[in-house]
């Protein structure tokens, strides 16, 4: 059985991948997938905490996170579609409306 | 209960016409408007009869608690007594006739629902003004009739001049209203009440007034009189009334001759016990009245617009009523109000018939000889003119000579002289109006002449009723010097309303003293003689249109004529010294204070932020990743600080 440290190390790697994806991928859908990856890294920490501390609070919290993540994905994907219809691209290099 | 119906019927009519019947035919809105008034008149008559058969004592009809704040109480209640009952009958009775007539007059217009709705609303407000038992309800009515007057003057609002006339009426009245409000406030401050019945109790039956109270009475009466000056078109606030003729003629008849403009006289009569206590104010009231009577009468002599002549005539006649109030002859003033309501409504409606027949031309120089084409209108107008100039036996004779007599004994020869001069002028300009319109050759163009004809029965029938009234109502107040008839019925009728407080009795000796009949007869003889001479002069000058003599007279007095034609340049004076400076000041406030200073500060702050933002905004690349990077770095730094 893996130790709790190994769970935390895995979660940190997942989270790092997510951050890396958000910062450097140009495709908005991949950016969103990276966000999901970060969320799930956090979920993994919650679940492992349940195991080490011996109460279910962390697992309850995970359900909330999954629900919110589902909503976020739905809204986010809808926005990506809307952006594509308006600008014809989802490449973040071309989406620079906020330039000062 | 009946009294509530009297008031609610016109409101119902206004609501029906204004809210529900906007799409229906003109006939329906006419029928709704007129029947609301007739129903109201029937209720008013019944209520009045009940009141009189119960002995004619005033009744207070409680509605509901309305305003209460600390010691201040103003319940919503009505007073029905001899004075307000009579006013109520005039308003609904003459109002009914005018509503019937208006159906014919407004036949060619679109959107008559608007007209009848406003007219009914006016009657409602006027009834509120007359029947209210305290100054605040009166004030609601006072403002309400002003509003309806504004709406109806500007009824043909597509024309800028009409809209401007409406605004002028509204604004000039506003000046008077400030006076009225100040009067109400002072009244509450010094007497603790604004109710008519309570005020009367305090003054007639209560303890002697204290010094400050006595002094306050002068200011209260003066402030309220400023309100009356606005509403009843007295110098110097009369300027709106002639312009108000821009409205449809039934409006001029109902609002600007018979009812609304008499509100000031009604208010002063209602508060006569206060005015008796302030002889100084009364002196001002009498002088203003006499001056207005003469001033307006002289202007009317040279006007060529038929409605303008009648408008200045109204101002002049209102001057008589105010003069009567000023010398303490309230019964005389209210009696003239009553007779004037009859014959001036008749004259305006008659002029309206002429205007309709002439296709809305109002210049008397283009009329002439209409007697042939409009015999009924001519007959009733003749009665109206004879009544207003004081032809012996008709209404105006009794009411006007009563006022002149009281002016002599109460105000002295100067006041009487001004009144008598005004009467002479009245005889001249009214005869001139009659001659130019109905006699001599017809001077209109061919097209207009072809279409000249008598108006329909819905228009002339009310005129006939009014003509009969104008002929006979004078006999309600026959002076003592004319034997063989019941004397001064009206004065006795109104005497329970008039109270001279004991403290003020010394100032009003002439109200109780007896005078020789020969003096009264002599004065009457002078004014009748003057009337005949000046009417005869007008007949000679104008019986065949403006005669060469008239034109020669106009040339040799061209200076005076020019001043009179331009109405003594009062409007120009007001514009130069009041309106234009106000406009300049507003322009200054707009262009300098608002645009430069205030906008400068507000926009300056905004621009300062823009400037600072502009200096830093080059950092904003708009790149999503760079933003995310900054967020991440921020979180990293925060966490580092928090954890270590």
Image (cartoon, grey):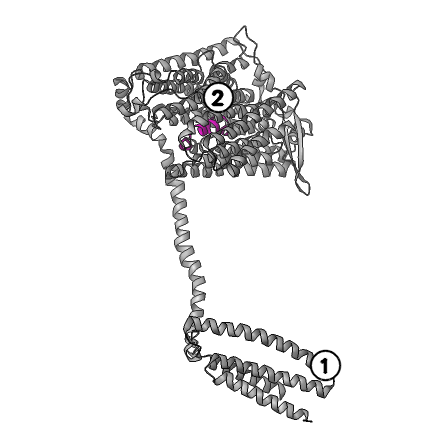
Expressed as whole percent of the image width and height from the top left, the position of residue B496 reads 63, 21
The answer to whether residue B311 is above or below residue B571 is above
The answer to whether residue A20 is above or below residue A97 is below
Provide the secondary structure element on which disc 1 rests.
Answer: loop
Q: Which residue is mark 2?
A: B340
Residue B253 in the magenta stretch? The answer is yes
In this rendered view, identify the residue nearer to me: B394 or B629. B629
Report the magenta residues as a range.
Answer: B242-261
Task: State whether residue B394 appears in this view.
Answer: yes
Expressed as whole percent of the image width and height from the top left, the position of residue A29 reads 49, 79
Quadrant assignment for the C terminus of chain B: bottom right
Q: Residues within 10 Å of mark 1 (few under 14, many from 20)?
A: few
Residue B259 in the magenta stretch? The answer is yes
Left or right: A57 in relation to B466: right
Quadrant assignment for the N terminus of chain B: top right
x 41%, y 45%: residue: B582
Q: Dominant secondary structure of the magenta stretch?
A: helix
Marks 2 and 1 sit apart, C-alpha to C-alpha, by: 97 Å
The answer to whether residue B205 is above or below residue A56 is above
Q: Quadrant of residue A13?
A: bottom right
Expressed as whole percent of the image width and height from the top left, the position of residue B29 reads 49, 32
Q: Chain of mark 2?
A: B
Task: State whether residue B149 appears in this view.
Answer: no
Q: Residues within 10 Å of mark 2 (few under 14, many from 20)?
A: many
Are labels 2 and 1 on one chain? no
x 58%, y 14%: residue: B489
Q: Which residue is mark 1?
A: A56
Provide the secondary structure element on which disc 2 rests.
Answer: helix
């Amino acid at each position: 059985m893996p130790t709790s440290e190994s769970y935390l190390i895995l979660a940190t790697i997942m989270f790092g991948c997510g951050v890396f994806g958000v910062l450097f991928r140009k495709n908005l859908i991949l950016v969103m997938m990276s966000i999901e990856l970060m969320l799930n890294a956090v979920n993994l920490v919650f679940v492992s905490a349940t195991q080490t501390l011996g109460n279910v609070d962390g697992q309850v919290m995970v359900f909330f996170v999954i629900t919110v993540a589902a909503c976020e994905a739905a809204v986010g994907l809808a926005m990506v579609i809307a952006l594509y219809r308006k600008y014809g691209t989802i490449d973040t290099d071309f989406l620079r409306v906020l330039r000062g | 209960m009946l009294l509530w119906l009297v008031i609610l019927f016109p409101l119902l009519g206004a609501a029906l016409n204004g809210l529900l019947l906007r799409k229906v035919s003109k006939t329906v809105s006419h029928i709704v408007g007129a029947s609301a008034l007739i129903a109201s008149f029937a209720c008013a008559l019944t209520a009045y009869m009940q009141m009189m058969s119960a002995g004619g004592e005033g009744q207070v009809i409680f509605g509901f608690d309305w305003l209460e704040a600390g010691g201040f109480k103003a319940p919503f209640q009505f007073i029905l007594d001899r004075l307000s009952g009579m006013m109520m009958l005039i308003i609904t009775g003459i109002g009914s006739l005018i509503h019937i007539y208006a159906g014919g007059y407004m036949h060619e217009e679109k959107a008559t629902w608007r007209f009848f709705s406003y007219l009914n609303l006016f009657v409602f407000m006027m009834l509120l003004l007359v029947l209210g038992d305290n100054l605040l309800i009166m004030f609601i009515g006072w403002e309400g009739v002003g509003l309806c007057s504004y709406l109806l003057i500007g009824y043909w609002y597509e024309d800028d001049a009409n809209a401007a006339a409406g605004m002028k009426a509204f604004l000039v009245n506003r000046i008077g209203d400030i006076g009225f409000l100040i009067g109400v406030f002072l009244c509450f401050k010094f007497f603790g009440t604004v109710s008519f019945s309570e005020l009367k109790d305090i003054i007639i039956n209560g303890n002697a007034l204290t010094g400050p109270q006595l002094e306050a009475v002068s200011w209260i009466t003066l402030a309220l009189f400023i309100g009356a000056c606005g509403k009843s078109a007295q110098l110097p606030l009369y300027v709106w009334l002639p312009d108000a003729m821009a409205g449809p003629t039934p409006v001029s008849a109902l609002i600007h001759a018979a009812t609304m403009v008499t509100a000031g006289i009604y208010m002063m009569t209602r508060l006569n016990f206060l005015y008796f206590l302030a002889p100084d104010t009364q002196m001002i009231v009498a002088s203003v009245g006499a001056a207005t009577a003469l001033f307006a009468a002289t202007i009317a002599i040279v006007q060529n617009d038929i409605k303008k002549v009648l408008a200045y005539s109204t101002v002049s006649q209102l001057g008589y009523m105010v003069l009567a109030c000023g010398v303490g002859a309230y019964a005389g003033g209210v009696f003239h109000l009553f007779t004037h309501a009859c014959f001036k409504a008749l004259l305006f409606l008659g002029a309206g018939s002429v205007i309709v027949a002439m296709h809305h031309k109002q210049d008397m120089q283009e009329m002439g000889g209409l007697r042939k084409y409009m015999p009924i209108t001519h007959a009733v107008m003749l009665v109206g003119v004879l009544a207003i100039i004081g032809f012996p036996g008709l209404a105006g004779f009794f009411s006007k000579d009563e006022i002149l007599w009281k002016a002599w004994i109460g105000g002295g020869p100067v006041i009487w002289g001004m009144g008598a001069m005004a009467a002479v002028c009245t005889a001249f300009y009214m005869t001139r109006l009659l001659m130019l319109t109905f006699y001599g050759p017809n001077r209109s163009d061919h097209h207009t002449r072809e279409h000249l004809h008598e108006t329909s029965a819905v228009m002339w029938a009310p005129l006939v009723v009014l003509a009969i009234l104008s002929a006979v109502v004078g006999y309600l107040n026959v002076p003592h010097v004319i034997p063989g008839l019941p004397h001064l019925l009206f004065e006795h009728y109104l005497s329970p309303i008039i109270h001279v407080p004991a403290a003020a009795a010394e100032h009003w000796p002439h109200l109780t003293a007896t005078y020789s009949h020969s003096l009264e007869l002599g004065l009457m003889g002078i004014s009748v003689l003057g009337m005949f001479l000046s009417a005869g002069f007008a007949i000679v000058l104008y019986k065949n249109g403006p005669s060469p003599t008239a034109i020669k007279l106009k040339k040799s007095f061209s200076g005076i004529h020019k001043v009179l034609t331009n109405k003594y340049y009062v409007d120009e004076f007001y514009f130069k010294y009041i309106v234009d400076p106000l406009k300049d000041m507003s322009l200054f406030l707009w262009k300098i204070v608002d645009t430069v200073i205030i906008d400068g500060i507000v926009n300056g702050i905004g621009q300062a932020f823009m400037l600072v933002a502009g200096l830093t905004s080059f950092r904003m690349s708009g790149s999503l990743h760079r933003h995310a990077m900054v967020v991440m770095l921020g979180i990293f730094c925060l966490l580092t600080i928090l954890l270590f």
